[in-house]
Amino acid sequence: MENFTFYSPTLFAFGDGQEKKTGALIRRFGGTRALLISGGGSVRKNGAYGDAAASLQAAGVPFAELDGVQPNPRSGKVREGIALARETGADFLLAVGGGSVIDTAKAVGLGILYDGDFWDFFRGAAPVERTVPVGVVLTIAASGSEGSDSAVITNEELGLKWGMPHSDLIRPRFAVLNPRYTCSLPPYQTACGAVDIIAHVLERYFTNTPDVALTDRLCEALVKTVLDAAPRAMENPGDLAARADLMWSGMLAHNNLCGTGRVQDWASHQIEHELSAFTDCAHGAGLAVVMPAWMEYVMTHDVPRFAQFAVRMLGCEMDFAAPERTAREGIARLRRFFASLGMPASLEELGFRADQIPAAAANRAKKPGGFPFGNFVKIGQPEAAAILRLALRRA
Ligand code: NZQ
Ligand code: ZN
């Protein structure tokens, strides 16, 4: 195991009814005037927004509103939020929604106190030193942004989707996690969320760090829980037990507890972000295609680890004479699981064409330190293109 620092200061209020605490939590963390940030309307339909607004009113916290955040959230909306927050004197940002809304809030929080353009933080040109605090009412189990130290924004002018450098300063102060809010999710979004949660675990699981037995076991528990809960939530959207497991798994998969002490990979996420920049596909749907292709591409680097993944997470029987067969079976089962959730199995299904591969792979070079990426196996531009080619058609 490697040395590590783990600082995860977010307060989590979990369960039905916890949303009533939202206003008081804003006050507890120093907010006196809030900006409520939301997406395209789902949270108004399922009651999450109204509940949050009522709680703020009860706690005497005045607020302004910024809605219309799109999935794969855009820089233009961040700039609109910064202007509105300055104009209304907001000293606390409440994100009501999923990863796109939360990441917008995180970026607005950085931008309010900064004289230049917020994108400077994303291109590594400005250090993260202070931010206006963010709170969350989560409505989809997926990104883990409710407890994470990062944010991902699409710069629509430049055609880039980038995560910003990690910083504990942008972790939300609190997150209200009411699984009931996720019952209104369409099956496709439930599935995208499940894939993203699994991917967050696997990005950490595939490591070259030795002696990581404890975090291996944490990762395995998380993936097995999602493999069990996601089909139940798909079949019965109102299954609160399944929704609760997914919601807490989503947080635990990405606040980095299960990544402590190990060098992590993240190649699949980097490739998926380029894909989303090109196709605007849902993050989880892109991962469902990219991650199995990445696995196939790197599997021979550490067959025993892939066989362990297959046996412990996917329930494969160990073939001691041919562990590679076990490893391949694990990848095949993961593919079948994603397909069973209705996820795409190829880039073609996402509307991505073979002739776009060179440009998507090259786009990454615009990012500071863009190549190579990934730590399990280093990925340069040719390798990124090779993984995209593997992902192009159904395996
Ligand atoms: O816009 P509305 O109408 O709210 O609809 C949303 C959106 O269309 C809908 N939705 C959310 N909750 C709902 C609901 N519909 C019905 N009922 C509900 N309860 O779901 C759609 C997707 O929302 P979005 O916020 O985009 O989903 P998600 O949470 O998966 O976030 C994805 C974004 O997070 C980034 C991704 O790249 C992507 O941009 N990520 C952020 C990370 C982080 N900050 O730590 C890490 C992740 O790896 C990821 O990259
Ligand atoms: Zn993700």
Image (cartoon, rainbow, N blue to C red):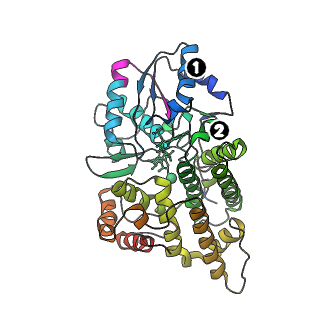
Task: Determine whether, in the image, residue 64 is placed left or right of residue 15.
Answer: left
Please give the range of residues in magenta: 85-96
Query: Seen in the image, is 107 located left or right of residue 21?
Result: left
Q: Helix, strand, or loop for circle 2?
A: helix
Q: Hey, what amino acid is under mark 2?
A: Pro
Mark sitting on residue 245: none
Q: Nearer the viewer, residue 188 or 126?
A: 188
How busy is the neighbourhood of tag 1: few (under 14 within 10 Å), some, or many (20 plus)?
A: some
Residue 83 in the image, given as x and y percentages of width and height: 32, 27
Label 2: few (<14), some (14–19) or many (≥20) C-alpha neighbours in 10 Å: many
Q: Quadrant of the N terminus?
A: bottom right
Ligand 1 neighbours mark 1 (CB distance < 8 Å)? no
Is 80 placed above or below 369 here?
above
Q: Residue 48 at x, y = what percent?
A: 56, 30
Residue 194 at what x, y percent from top left? 59, 53
Asked whether residue 266 appears in the rendered view, the answer is no
Asked if one can make out residue 216 in the rendered structure from this viewpoint, the answer is yes
Residue farthest along the bottom direction in this orientation: 321
- Residue shown at 69% from the left, 34% from the top: 15
Q: Which residue is mark 2?
A: 179
SS at mark 1 in the image: helix
- Residue shown at 60% from the left, 54% from the top: 259
Q: Amino acid at mark 1?
A: Ser
Image position, residue 187 (x, y; %): 57, 50
Residue corresponding to mark 1: 55
Q: Is residue 73 left or right of residue 214?
A: left
Question: Is 113 left, or right, of 17 in this rendering?
Answer: left
